[in-house]
Image: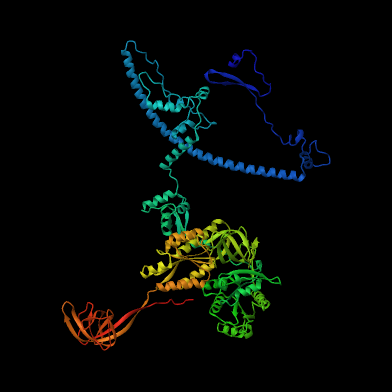
Amino acid sequence: MSDADDNNSSGRRPLSLKRPGAGTVQQSFARGRSKAVVVEKKRKRVVTPGKDSGPAGGRGPGGAGASKGESALAAKARQLGLSEEELVSRQRAIARARAESADRDAKKKQEEAERSARADAERQNLDDLKAREADEAKAAEREAEAAAEARRLAEADASRDADDGPKKGDGEVRRKPAAEKRPQRPMDGADLPDPAATLDAMGGRVKRKGPPVSAGPVKPGQQQTPARAKADSRRRGKLTIQNILEGDEERQRSLASVRRAREREKQRRSDGTTAREKISREVIIPESITVADLANRMAERSMDVIKYLMKQGQMVRMDDVLEADDAELIVEDFGHTVKRVSESDVETGFIASDDPEESKVKRAPVVAIMGHVDHGKTSLLDALRSTDVVSGEAGGITQHIGAYQVQLKSGDKITFLDTPGHAAFSAMRSRGAEATDIVILVVAADDSVKPQTIEAIKFAKAAGTPIIVAVNKIDKHEADPQKVITDLLQQDIVVEAMSGDVQSVNISAKKRTGLDELTDAILLQAELLDLKANPDRDAEGVVIESKIDKGRGSVATVLVRRGTLKRGDLLVAGGQWGRVRALTNERGQTLAEAGPSVPVEVLGLDGAPDPGEVFAVVENEGRAREIAMYRQRKTRSAGGAQNVGLGTSLEQMMARLQENQTKEMPLLIKADVQGSAEAIKQSLERLGNDEVQAKIVLAAAGGVNEGDVLLAKSSGSPIFAFNVRANKQARDLAEREKVEIRYYSVIYDVIDDVRNTMEGMLAPEKRENFIGYADILEVFNITRFGKAAGCRVTEGVVKRGCGVRLLRNDTVVHEGHLSTLKRFKEEVKEVKAGTECGMGFIEYQEIQKGDKIECFEIIEVPRKLESNG
């Protein structure tokens, strides 16, 4: 009878169901307690395809549940409440799942085989390590046994000498060998080492819940060492009720301890002969690369690269930039191969090649209206658009490019670009000619051909763009269209009326006459050009204008040349990039997309791109950021060093220039649009010469802010605000920092102010003005003075302190100044012709009788800058 039966006072056995597979298990507890537990084994039902293939007791397809007239598949579907198609789909899905499961099982078996091979290799290494440690342990054990035997013999001799000493062997307990303490247990018949012994060999330790088996009792007269007591207390762990109840069972080892043991073993292997094999890689190196990026491409640690450079005498950080030559040496020293590439390769494929002809469709022509200032370009566009844009322009001139699309009564569409006519906007006109298909040359009938008209013709010819001449203002009394046609002959523009190939139309934008003939001429020229584009691709085009709008951020006016620009596209334009947030046309309407030849305003770029930059849609943000950063680095490297200065107003700058501290005039320009800022910058840079020039610190679009004021303060430049204003914070900061802000609305005023200031920077021209001649009649020696010349003024006048040249036989022997001028022993300011006087020269005594004296004055003539406009 068991202990549980003894403890049961009633003598009855526990109630249990008499089921097959049931039984009792004796469960043992600490302190000799035990208990009988009823255990029931549950059987799993094994489904046999032939017997239990269908529900409800085996009524499957073709079984008893199926009717006579229906098939097995239909019966099965009916029983499951499904249609035949759904049942077939489920069976196919089950078949696919089984096939995938079979593939996974095969892969799992292959991975297990690989793990088994690696485990065998590790087991072999552990066996070798254990064998070496076993040999060392045996040697140490033999030494310990010899020492113990000697100690035992000494104790035996001492006990024989004592009359009532303890008998030999009392209280002695033989120390069991380490092999007896940790017997190896076979695992599935395989001869594997004991896990505890293996972990001990790897440098780890086994955590135990109860107190460990003692390595041996403390013999009489032998005290327990502090190290041994500390180890026993460490292995024993906390004394809890659970430890008392569960007994001396071993606790499982922590994951951290296993990892530490593995790391120690890996370190041992790396220190040995089994070194990791070096993998050589091909490393792509651009023109400049950071230390972290170079280490990542070599698959090396950044600290290893930094340590290598420190040994070479270079103190670098992870984000420091290395030159391509230095990076190549580092890669070769680390045992890799180098592939040098150019940094400009990042733009490869940015602008795609031409599209096949079968993918192109007809598109609207893009027309640029060009001509001299005040010849009626904007008025003509107003007449076509039935709008009034002229009233919104300062001074009656257009100072930025406007892009509009006009739909005619016939349904045809024409895209117009209005370009400024002032000389300062030549770059904008050339940009308009390069971005368009047709150029309309507007010439006033009462003014004929002017310099900017000739310049527009040159731009159109350079771009290879056909020209249509629009003779405007024919309603005026003094209009002479024939003179315009004749003057254009000098520029190689031959109209059709004179057997040429250039169309000419007489119009009046004010009276709205001749507009239909002009649009017909545009459509005819577009038909001859056969303008087509592929709309089914990523958009590409050109930036017409850009600005910083308060509330909307960076706004770029772009013209799509091919493809379709959609909201959400990633756009790269110059050194700026971003995701298109909104598209609006010239009427302020929001568009979902813009096709070829459509001008739109794009919101979403991280900055205002320069007008004339080509834009394109890219596939991801990484490529967009890479291209934009490359272009920004290229722009910064071409920009040169920054200007330094101290003054922040034109008056202070002039004071510095008079002291010859600088010959450069730093300026900071803020304009309403990027095109105007660029035009002002180019105009001011052309004002300079070899002696003095304007240095543009910044030319950007947007209002004046605190950052602009701080930049102007550090660079010593005034701020020129063109059609923009400074906010309150910027005004207050400018007053505190004494930074001058000048506001302009017409570009003439900007150029004139800077021209006048730069002319004051020029060193004045020095000219000699001859005032008189004198002859030396006699030379006198005067005490404490030296030689003095008695002279007669023969021509003009001689002034005290004027410049003199001493001529002897028509040769200049001395050039200097008069130190004294006397008449009858009195000092005088000047002596006129026909009068005798006495002269003394500064630091010159070698005068002779008969020498001639030439007197002159130095006058300074202000200089003017030459016009380059």
Residue occupying the point 38% across, 27% down: 227
Residue occupying the point 39% across, 29% down: 138
Asked where in the image residue 717 lies, by quadrant, the reply is: bottom left
Question: On the picture, is 516 further left or further right than 207?
Answer: right
Q: Nearer the viewer, residue 228 or 707?
A: 707
Question: On the picture, is 707 further left or further right than 416?
Answer: left
- Which x, y percent locates residue 119? 51, 38
Residue occupying the point 56% across, 56% down: 621
Q: Residue furthest left?
A: 783
Q: Nearer the viewer, residue 284 or 711?
A: 711
Q: Residue furthest right?
A: 69
- Which x, y percent locates residue 731? 48, 60
Please tell me whether residue 399 is drawn above or below residue 208 in the rendered image.
below
Please tell me whether residue 362 is drawn above or below residue 777 in the rendered image.
above
Report whether residue 439 is seen.
no
- Which x, y percent locates residue 409? 71, 72
- Which x, y percent locates residue 369? 60, 74
Q: Nearer the viewer, residue 574 or 324?
A: 574
Report whether residue 420 is seen.
yes
